[in-house]
Image: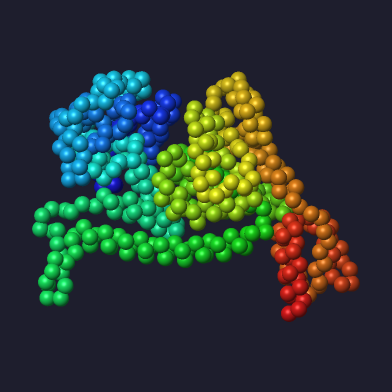
Amino acid sequence: MFETTEGPVRAILVAVQLPDVDAVAFRSSVAELGRLARTLGVEVAGQVVQRRTALHPGTVLGKGKLAELQRMIGGEAAGVEADEDGDEDEDEDEDEDGEDQADAIEREDAAPGTDGAVQAVLVDHELTPSQARNLEKVTGIEVMDRTSVILEIFRRHSRSRAAKAQVEIVRLQYLVPRLREQGKGRDRQRGGIGGKGAGESSLELDRRKIRDRIAELGREIEALAEEQRTQRARRRDMSRVALCGYTNAGKSTLMRALTGSEVYVADKLFATLDTTVRTLVPPAHPRILVSDTVGFIDKLPHGLVASFKSTLDEALEAGLLAHVVDASDPSFERQLQVTVELLDEIGAHDVPRLLIFNKVDRVGDAAAEEAARVGLLARWPDAVVMSARRASDVAALRQRLIDFFARDLVEREVLLPYDRQGLRGEIFAVCDVLEERSEDDGIHLQVRAHPSSLERLARLVAERVSA
C-alpha cells in the first residue's frame, strides 16, 4: 500500500466519538492515528471528526460529515445506496447529535481543507467490509481502517522469518472477509472432468488459496517456535528481564543503554517487532539477560496478539517484566492500562513487574521534571522514574535489576574435579564465584547462584563423572 505512489501520500483522518469514550481518550486516539500514519510515511492533510450515538452502519459518518469529507478530498457530495450486504442508504436522517455539531477537537485541530491530491482516508475504527466499500465508492480513493494501518506497519517493519510469517497470517485472515468478485465473466472457473459443472467461483478459489497459505505459514511458525523454545530452554536457569510496554515508550533505547547492543532505535511506532536478547553490561554475576519485546497499542488487533504469542512467550518466561511507560506522553495512564490489560490477556498475571517511567527529561524544564518525578513516585512508590539517555539513571536501574535477582541467590560450595575443567566457563556464566581454592580432589568454588542453576551444574558434573 502506498509504496508505488510517486511523491508523498496525503490522507484524511476520520473518527467518531461514541458516548462511552470521553473527550481525552478520543483526542488521544485521533492523535495516535496521526502518528501511525506518519510511521507509514503518510502526510495528514486534515481530519473529519463527529459525535454520534453509534457508527453509521453504511458509511461510519453521517451525511453532513460525509459531504465535508468529499469536499476536503475534492469530490462532490453523493448518497450511498444500500449495497448487496444490506447497508442502509446514506440519505437517512442524522443522529440526535446533529450533523453539524462539531466536537471541540475538530474545531481546534482539523484542517478546513487540503492543498493537493488526497490518496487515502484513514478511519480510527475497525470497519466492516461493506463500510469500507461504501466509503471507497463515495470518496473514490483508498480507505484503511485502524487495523489495516497497524497491519501495514507490522508488515513493513518485520525483519525475521517468524515476524514476517506471523504478520502475513493476520493480514490474510483480515483479507478473507473483504474479498469480492472482480468483474463479470470471472465468477466461475471451469469445473470437473470434461469441463462440466459450475466449478469454483473466483471468490471461492481465492479464499481456498488463502486458507492453504495460512496453513502453510502456520506450519512454518510452529517449526520456528520450536527453535525459539529450544533457545529459551538454554536460558531457563539465567536471570531474565523482559522489557514490555506501549509502542514508542523507549524500550529499544533503554535496551541499548542497558546492554550496549546496537538494536534498532527510531522515533516510530512499532520500530521493534522481533525479540532481541542481550546480556546486561557491565556484566552482572550471575549474568542477567535483557529482552526487548514488541510494543503494544490501544485497539491492537487480537489476531496480532495471538500470532505473536511465541514472541511474547519471552515475557511469560522472564523472571521480571520491566514495564516501560513514556512519562512525557499526556495519555500515559491510558497507555499503562492498555499494556496491563494485554499482558493479562497473554497470561502474564503472575510474573513480577517493575514499573519504569521513561523520558522524564522530556516533560519540560528542571522544575517540571522534578514535579513530575515527585508526583509519579507519590502514586507509584516502587516505580523507577528515569531517562534512558542519562547514564546515572541507567546505572541506578541496572543496580535495581541486580538487587531484584540477588534476593533469590544462595551460597554454596561446588567441587569441580580436575578432569572436568570444561565446565568452568559454564560455572562462571551462571554463578558469582566468591572464592576459589585447589584441593587434592579438585577445584573448590564458593559461589552464589540460583538454586536451579546449582542443581543443573550438579547434574552436569555427575554426568561427566559417570561417563
Where is 436 relative to 363, above or below?
below
Q: Is residue 284 above or below residue 15?
A: below
Corner quadrant of residue 459: bottom right
Q: Position of residue 101 (x, y in %)?
A: 29, 20
In the displayed structure image, the side of residue 64 where residue 461 appears, left or right: right
Measured as percent of width and height from the top left, residue 13 is found at: 31, 32
Q: Residue at x 14, y 58 (%)?
A: 187
Give the residue at x 14% y 66%: 198
- The one nearer the camera, 439 or 346, is 346
Q: Position of residue 12 (x, y in %)?
A: 28, 33
Q: Is residue 172 left or right of residue 457?
A: left
Q: Nearer the viewer, residue 69 or 282?
A: 69
Q: Nearer the viewer, residue 232 or 252?
A: 232
- In the image as oriented, which residue stretches furthest toward the right? 440
Q: How is the image coloured?
A: rainbow
Whether residue 316 appears in this view of the structure is: yes
Residue 7 visible to an observer of this rendering: no
Q: Quadrant of the C terminus?
A: bottom right
Residue 123: x and y in percent read 31, 36
| Residue at (12, 76) in percent of width and height | 194
So how many labels did they put on this image?
A: 0
List the single residue furthest toward the left.
Answer: 185
Side of 178 where 193 appears, left or right = left
**Residue at x 64% of width, y 35% of height:** 384
